[in-house]
Amino acid sequence: MLSQDSPTIPSFDDLPLDKNGPPGNAWGLWGEHDELGMLNRITPQVVAAAAREIQNGHRISLDWPLDKPSHPAFDRRRFHHEILNKAPMTMNDDAIYINTQSSTQWDGFRHYGYQRTKQFYRGHRQEDFVPGQGPLSIDVFARHGGITGRGVLLDWYSWAQKNGIHRSPFETGAVELSHLKAILQEKSIELRPADILFIRVGFTAEYDKLSIEQQQNFPNRQPGGLLGLEASRDSLRWLWVNQFAAIASDAAGFERGPATGSYNDPDVSIHQWCLAGWGLPLGELFNLDELAQYCQKHGRWTFFVQSMPLKIPGGVASPANAVAIF
């Protein structure tokens, strides 16, 4: 349910909207100064309708611990925590260091741009971004009530196991769009405009099975790459047509990775089209294991979700601070 004030959504074949911009962009759909992108879909009416998903009040955290993975890939600095004792007083503070891309996170619109044209959402360029201020800051999400609405889980990991499909989440591979459509049909899941989509590929479940040595070697594993949604025009068309407000996964990169791999058309990238083209937040490394167990047990695949990114002025990404409520 969208507000009557929401713009008419153009067809996928009408993209790009800015004909002078890069492929697939929807620049201008929400106005020339927009910083929310598809989060504009989350209207008060949408939130009120999503609240009807709350029936028994059962709550499930969707965040992985901040210190997982213990050894992040892509040369990202490890989580660091200090307890700051205030002796002689019986009192402690603490301090943490995180790379906002290292554990459960929402990618904001400063994170990834069109690689050929060097442009971010609405045409912004790297020189527009400074710490503490400026356009496309992640704190805009929080200042407008966070990522709040009706969540939908597609448990591809369990579905694949049931259907004899075995793909490591730690190697490059594709979660096929046809699989997601099969799950929707089998579970009788109806998608609605402004839904927040979660796709479980089994990354966190399989990571927790690794030995300490394997976790330490994770950034250097061979073969490398990551399992994720296939980056194709059909996938992008499906994401666009279903009018999601945000999309997330337990995968480390959401789409098949690395996104710049030879198997991908360099102009057909989910990161580029969603973040830089449409302003569609991408979530990664969500902890969906307990959620999947609960959904399976109760036959419910939709829920109310509340996620409040940190108010980091000028920020690129943020921990999710997300909870599903049934």
Image (spheres, helix red, strand yellow):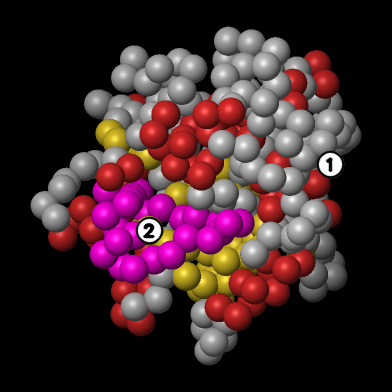
Residue tagged by mark 2?
A: 154
Judge left or right: residue 166 versus residue 121: left
**Residue that carries the numbered disc 1 in the rendered image:** 313
Residue positioned 21% across, 53% down in the render? 160
Comparing 207 with 247, the one in front is 247
Is residue 201 within the magenta segment?
yes
Q: Position of residue 14 (x, y in %)?
A: 58, 28
| Mark 1 → mark 2, Cα distance in angstroms | 33 Å
Q: Check if residue 9 falls in the magenta segment.
A: no
| Drawn side of residue 54 relative to residue 4, left or right | left
Q: Nearer the viewer, residue 105 or 241?
A: 241
Disc 1 packing (10 Å; few <14; some 14–19; many ≥20): some
Q: Relative to 95, is 297 above or below?
A: below
Could you say which quadrant of the image residue 277 lies in? top right
**Residue at point 46% right, 35% down?**
236
Callout 1: helix, strand or loop? loop
Indicate which label's residue lies in the foreground, 1 or 2: 2
In front of the other: 10 or 77: 10
| SS label for mark 2 | strand
- Write the residue at 32% across / 52% down: 181
Tag 1: amino acid: Pro
Return the x and y of residue 312 as percentages of the image width and height.
79, 45
